[in-house]
Amino acid sequence: MRMFELRKNGARAQGIVFDDGTVALRWNTSYPSTVLHAGMHAVELTYGKAHIDWVDNDAAREHARLLDRINSLEADVEKVTRERDIKSTALDLVTTDQQLWYEDVMAKAEAIVDQSYNEAAPDA
């Protein structure tokens, strides 16, 4: 696989020649588009006198490695965010459970106080 940049009449496209010879061009214009060609011969026939700069393969590999690293970091961030959301939800549930427990204890205590008061009060 080889990468290149094609320039014609001020427009710029990034290109990739795949191992089977197929070429993909991504035009970076105000209306971006992607075009597939059967090979570089088709690109030259289609665009005529266009300037082509081949990208150094080492730079292309480093670029691909960095993109993979970015994707990996984004996946890590998504995982941490999900874990944080789960912990936050669990904390909310614990807080709710504690609140329900507190209300239950207070209701029982109030019932005991009412019962004690009723037992101690003289009948009228």
Image (tube, rainbow, N blue to C red):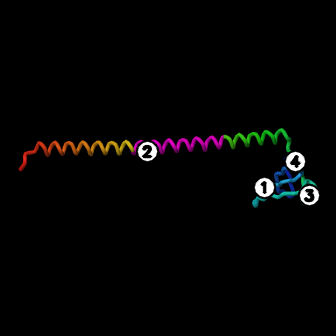
- Overall secondary structure of the magenta section: helix
Q: Could you classify mark 4 by the number of other residues whose Cα lies within 10 Å: few (under 14), some (14-19), or many (20 or more)?
A: few
Element under label 3?
Answer: helix
Q: Which mark is residue 19?
A: 4
Q: Nearer the viewer, residue 48 or 99?
A: 99
Question: Which quadrant of the figure has residue 8?
Answer: bottom right
Q: How many marks?
A: 4
Q: Nearer the viewer, residue 49 or 122?
A: 122
**Cα gap from disc 2 to disc 4, whole angstroms:** 55 Å
Which residues make up the magenta segment? 73-96
Q: Could you classify mark 1 by the number of other residues whose Cα lies within 10 Å: few (under 14), some (14-19), or many (20 or more)?
A: few
Cβ atoms under marks 2 and 3 closer than 8 Å: no
Amino acid marked by disc 3: Ala
Relative side of 112 to 33, left or right = left
**Cα gap from disc 4 to disc 1, whole angstroms:** 24 Å
Q: Of callouts 4 and 3, which one flags the residue occurring earlier in the amino acid sequence?
A: 4
What residue is shown with label 3?
Answer: 42
Residue 104 inside the magenta-drawn segment: no
Q: Nearer the viewer, mark 4 or mark 1?
A: 4
**Cα gap from disc 4 to disc 3, whole angstroms:** 16 Å
Element under label 4?
Answer: loop
Q: Of callouts 2 and 3, which one flags the residue occurring earlier in the amino acid sequence?
A: 3
Please tell me whether residue 34 is drawn above or below residue 118 in the rendered image: below
**Cα gap from disc 2 to disc 3, whole angstroms:** 63 Å
Q: Nearer the viewer, mark 1 or mark 2?
A: 2
Amino acid marked by disc 4: Asp
Q: Of callouts 4 and 1, which one flags the residue occurring earlier in the amino acid sequence?
A: 4
Q: Residue 89, how many percent across, how many down?
A: 48, 45
Q: Could you classify mark 3 by the number of other residues whose Cα lies within 10 Å: few (under 14), some (14-19), or many (20 or more)?
A: some
Q: Which mark is residue 28?
A: 1
Relative side of 81 to 113, left or right = right
Name the residue at 15% across, 44% down: 117
